[in-house]
Amino acid sequence: MTDRRTRMRRTMVEREAELATVDEALDQLTGPGPDAGGALLAFSGPAGLGKTTLLAELRRRAHARSCTVLAARGGEQEQGQPFHVARQLIQPQLAGTSEQELRAALGGWYSIVGPALGLCAPEQGAPPDPQGLRDGLDWVLTHLVVKRAPVTLVLDDAHWADPESLGWLAAFAPRAEHLPLLLVVAYRPDELPADADAFRTLPGRAGQRPLPLAPLTPAAVAALVRAWLGDHADDAFCQEAWAVTAGNPFETVELAAKVRDKGLPPVEANAPLLRDLAAAQRGSGLVARLERLGPSTVRFAWACAVLGTAIPQDLAARVAALGSEEAVDATGRLRDARILSAATEEPEAGLEFVHPLIATGIYRAIPDALRVALHGKAAAAVVDAGLGPSAAARHLLETHPENDPWVVRILREAAGENLRAGAPEAARRQLARALREPPDFDERAAVLYELGCASLLTEPANTVNHLRAALAEPFDDPALRQGIVIRLAQVLSHSDRLAEASESLAREIPYTQDVRARLRLQSEQFMWDAFNAAETDSPARSRRLARLADRLTGRDLTERYVIGLRAWDACLRGEPVDVVLHHAGRVLERPFSWAYEDRGFEVPVLVAMAHMYADRPGRAEELFEAGTAEFERQGWRGAHLSFAYSLRAYILYRRGRLAAAEDLARAGLALAERVGRRTPVHWYAIAILLTTLLARGRVDEAWELGREHEYGRPFPAAVVFPDSQTVYAELLLARGQVRAAVAELEEVDRRLTPRGIQNPAWCPWQLHLARAVAADDPHRARALAGDAVRRARAFGAPSGIGQALRVAAEVAAPEERAGLLEEAVALLAESPAGYELARALGALGDELRDVDLLARAVVTARGCGADWLVARAADALLGLGGTPPCGPDGKDGEEGPTQDGLTEEELRAARRAAGKPAPDGSGRRGQHPDWALSAACRKLGSDVPGLAAALEAYAP
């Protein structure tokens, strides 16, 4: 440790309270017992008040207590370099390891966080989303903390940290209290960037308050002056030193050093000279002091100010146009003048300014034109030194446009690296600058396209403008044009502008000469039309899709996407289940990824959901599990993962696994909240959670949740399943607001019927409306329910028919109810729909006053987690003199449907039933269902016709 640093530590004064807080936090971090643990400390104050000195002492004390210290510092010049701070913190802990060791250390996060941390090159393929990258950084830091505990993480000059690192650490900081981690930050409160709101509120969220550093008192300034000049410094001299420095510790130390260097006696007679000496330390005085060191030294200092922190001497020499010997001499002079010092005590650590105030003063003193030129030289030097386009790009952002193709190339390469590394905002800045250079005439469309890709997640409106501008450019690359049109349609769709998305594709299709390219555009148009709730020509579109898909063989990915859309369209329209499964099966004959780089995940999701509605939820879950794993491997932990969690929850709901569905739906909603409210992913998440809560009987909780999330009008333009307006009407109905529910459901009718969407398994609006109008208009109620039964039979899924029959019985004449319910139970017993079976059993038991049926309803409802249904069936059972049963093991708990392991009896029943001809759904089943077979259907997630395939995949 240098003499200067030792002296600064020894002469640090009036920081006893702060150091006591530091010691208390370190005691808590390193001490034994249950109270040991981490904490957050935040020190704030204007420049020069000693934050860096305090943190240096904190690091020394942490080392003395055998803590692992992770340290980083924000840099005024490095703010635009994404993950600059994160790299400083983590890279040294992993640097020097082999690729094999690094892969072992990072596990599945290697390709996600490795590029951001500079540990490996970005891989080709779709980049991680920013939230996925943050989750990966969370994992890496948590892993390091646990492995190398106790850990002290120190971030100085946090106000200059890059936005990517700043946002990540602000979100991570509250975890420090639950880890063996002391997280310490220091910043200037008035200089936090505008986009650092999360960091600005961090101390309050973490249960701490920032500790502001106060200026030194006159007595403390006197102590500092005497520590540097000797105890003979008189009071008047010290008082004047306090007056001219305003109690700023940095300025006090620099002033004392200046007095010592000049050999000025610290007496009252020389006190008037202090003001001029202090002025020489800052602003024009600092510049004049620097200029006295000679032109070559000035150029070297300017080069260092442009390069930022941890400055390689040879790089600074090149930027300053100095030889190696001149650079050594300049470095020595700047060190003697207390302008530069070594960044750390490591021999290869590079140089840094003694204080950020000096760096800022020198940087701002560089003449504007020369500063721009120096940044240009720095960019070239960085590239020649092999530091990569991203390191050069931050300098190019400070230069003026000069129509230089090299600048455009470096900025595009840097943007590509940053986009693949999960820093789209940095990529957007670089591409916007490349556009101003400007690019060559034939390159402009490509830059606009790349800019649109980079701003897709953060600025969808600007993305649309960029992509439309790209299409307006004259260029001859058909592949680029197709990519632009597809990306434009994608961003319009995700902005709830599906009609515009379809129109943009429709305009391009007639002018696309290549047959395969035209098919790709058609597949995209079919997809976004399928999601457009206000599509005006839906039946005609379905006919075109059917004609096209039925003649395709599935020879490539585009054809399989078209076939997948055909399967979904058949499901919505209620075509027979066999047709739906036939087309879905054609899609899945070969591996079908959910994460193709240039494709959305919508079609794989639709194919999986078609299986669910066709009473193959077990297969749907398999597909979702595979898709979710792909999302996680790619680092897609925002909207993609929220969709996966929420829709998997809906599959569980359809299987009657309500408790597990609720947990997964809440996880999906938490992720959707990161994306934003009233976005498509949020509509899905909240609709599925509300549906699940209603099934569990928690109506008031569902209502409050809906109010909290502003669930209601206006409903989204995109198709959501379950249908948002229908779920809202069901919620109103559960609350007893019948008239309002009827109005919503009648509007659903007007919206869906013209589109030819007739499958009550997908949207049971007719069943809800029948229940709503039954009291006032029983004839209409029976007609609605009867039509729903007819449509359900046409589709042919036992769960859909059983549900429709149950509601038909609820609104039927008394003499018809038993027969309808008996058929409903028989059908549902051979389906995977546990919750619907429990409801039908309860209704039939009530109707027939049958204690055995009611007992089975209790057990089945309990296994589903349908608490209201358990209570209702149990009350009815008690009223008939029966006793509510316990679970199969003699304890109240979940029954077999939530456990996938088949008993021997269930396995035999499933094997007997597998391969038998499928009933057509048009007649009544036997009066005594095979309950072993019923349990097998629920556990395997399949109706009887699908048992053979389900048994092949079954692994006991």
Image: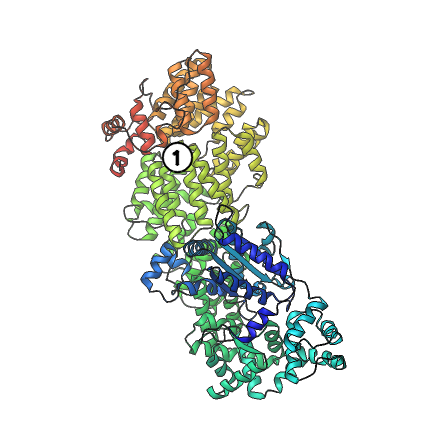
In the figure, residue 955 lies in which quadrant? top left
Would you say 824 lies left or right of 28 here? left
Q: Position of residue 557 (x, y in %)?
A: 33, 52
Tell me the crowding category of disc 1: few under 14, some 14 to 19, or many 20 or more residues within 10 angstroms, Cα based.
many
Q: Is residue 352 visible?
A: no
Residue under pointer 1: 574
SS at circle 1: loop
Q: Residue at x 63, y 83 (%)?
A: 261
The answer to whether 839 is drawn above or below residue 879 in the figure is below
The answer to whether 63 is drawn above or below residue 373 in the figure is above
Observer-nearest of 539 and 443:
443
Observer-nearest of 82 and 255:
255
- Give, as a three-letter code, the residue at label 1: Gly
Would you say 945 lies left or right of 176 here? left
Q: Is residue 273 visible?
A: yes
Q: Position of residue 171 (x, y in %)?
A: 53, 53
In the figure, residue 874 lies in which quadrant? top left
Q: Position of residue 112 (x, y in %)?
A: 40, 58
* Quadrant in which the C terminus appears: top left
Q: Residue furthest front?
A: 232
